Image (spheres, rainbow, N blue to C red):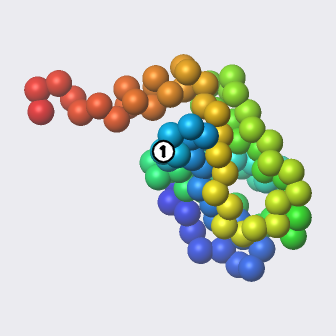
Amino acid sequence: MTPVDGGADAVIGTVLDFETHRALPRRIVTIDAVSALTDDAGRFSIPHAPAVYDALIVDPDHSTVSLYRALERRNPTMLHHPSVAANATDHACRRPPVGT
């Protein structure tokens, strides 16, 4: 997913690991029943959101969620406690192929 420029009501943000502050790819971010997947840099874009909104972050394996309530920022950086299984998958996906 590549975040796109949105209108004044767009939310374009980033999801980071709570402890390491590293980007968290492939997290599902939902705002006002609209979902987006974070890219490799942890960025996401929701094209339309209310002035005050709740944001839900879900790990790829659906084992861990974070809920942010009553946000107003259009460019939030949200910290998330990823599951151990989701972290292992993220790091495994980033390893270069053997022999390169």
Q: Nearer the viewer, residue 69 or 5?
A: 69
Crowd band around label 1 with a 10 angstrom C-alpha radius: few (<14), some (14–19), many (20+): few
The residue under the point 50% across, 40% down is: 20
Residue 4 locus on image (x, y percent): 57, 68
Q: Most extreme residue toward the left, as rendered?
A: 99
Residue receiving disc 1 = 22
Q: Would residue 100 appear left or right of 6 to someone viewing this image?
A: left
| Secondary structure category for the residue under label 1 | loop
The residue under the point 48% across, 45% down is: 22
Q: Nearer the viewer, residue 47 or 44?
A: 44
Residue 98 versus residue 47 in the image, above or below: above
Q: Most extreme residue toward the top, as rendered?
A: 85
Residue 77 locus on image (x, y percent): 64, 57
Q: Nearer the viewer, residue 36 or 15?
A: 15
The residue under the point 17% across, 24% down is: 98
For the question of whether residue 26 can be seen, the reply is no
User: Amino acid under label 1?
Assistant: Arg
Q: On the rendered image, what quadrant is the C terminus found in?
A: top left
Q: Would residue 64 appear left or right of 54 to someone viewing this image?
A: left
Q: Would residue 48 appear left or right of 87 to someone viewing this image?
A: right
Residue 57 versus residue 74 in the image, above or below: above
Query: Dividing the picture into quarters, in which one does residue 75 lie?
Result: bottom right
Residue 2 versus residue 67 in the image, above or below: below
Total numbered circles: 1
The residue under the point 11% across, 26% down is: 99
Residue 94 locus on image (x, y percent): 34, 35
